[in-house]
Image (cartoon, rainbow, N blue to C red):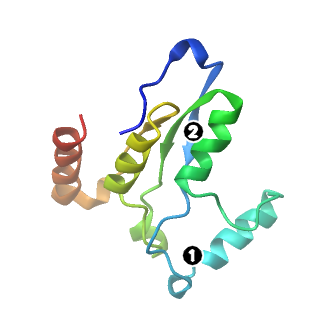
Amino acid sequence: MGAPMNLDDIVAIDFHTHAEEACGMHADDGYDDLQHAMAQYFHSPFKTPPTIPETAEYYRQRRIAAVIFAVDAEAATGHRRYNNEDIATLAAEHSDILIPFASIDPARGKMGVREARRLVSDFR
């Protein structure tokens, strides 16, 4: 686990920071094509989305805390989602700057409820 966040060192909080580049995401599901199209659309200077550690360093250099999450759109897009447990674990390694937030598609029903309960109990 990383160092605790020192709020006296923080100048702002970005409440909407996407975690986009997960281990296990492959071109076979079209994810890379989607990211390329989004980078062009949003005129991003980056060829690929940053990893969570890269995102943490970006925000750390600017003294901005970030609430980081993925979007659970797996059912709608067919793209594998960034696992909430992985986000929580990586955010804990960068707890001086990152605040994890889970994303669970309500269409997951009881599976989503179980995941939410597990996240609350395992990542307090």
Left or right of 121: which side holds 46? Answer: right
In the rendered image, the vertical position of residue 36 relative to residue 88, given as above or below: below
Q: Residue at x 69, y 67 (%)?
A: 48
Residue 33: image x %, image y %?
A: 66, 78
Quadrant of the rendering where the N terminus is positioned: top left
Q: Amino acid at mark 2?
A: His
Crowding near the residue tagged with mark 1, few <14, some 14–19, many ≥20 C-alpha atoms within 10 Å: some
Residue 96: image x %, image y %?
A: 49, 30
Question: What kind of element bears circle 2?
Answer: strand
Q: Amino acid at mark 1?
A: Tyr
Q: Residue at x 55, y 59 (%)?
A: 20
Q: Quadrant of residue 73?
A: bottom left
Left or right of 90: which side holds 116? Answer: left
Q: Residue at x 16, y 40 (%)?
A: 121
Residue 74: image x %, image y %?
A: 42, 68
Left or right of 47: which side holds 83? Answer: left
What label sits on residue 73 in the rendered view? none
Q: Quadrant of residue 42?
A: bottom right
| Circle 2 residue | 16
Residue 105 visible? The answer is no
Left or right of 38: which side holds 80? Answer: left
Crowding near the residue tagged with mark 2, few <14, some 14–19, many ≥20 C-alpha atoms within 10 Å: few
Residue 51: image x %, image y %?
A: 57, 58
| Circle 1 residue | 31
Q: Nearer the viewer, residue 76 or 10?
A: 10
Q: Nearer the viewer, residue 22 or 4?
A: 4
Residue 87 visible? The answer is yes
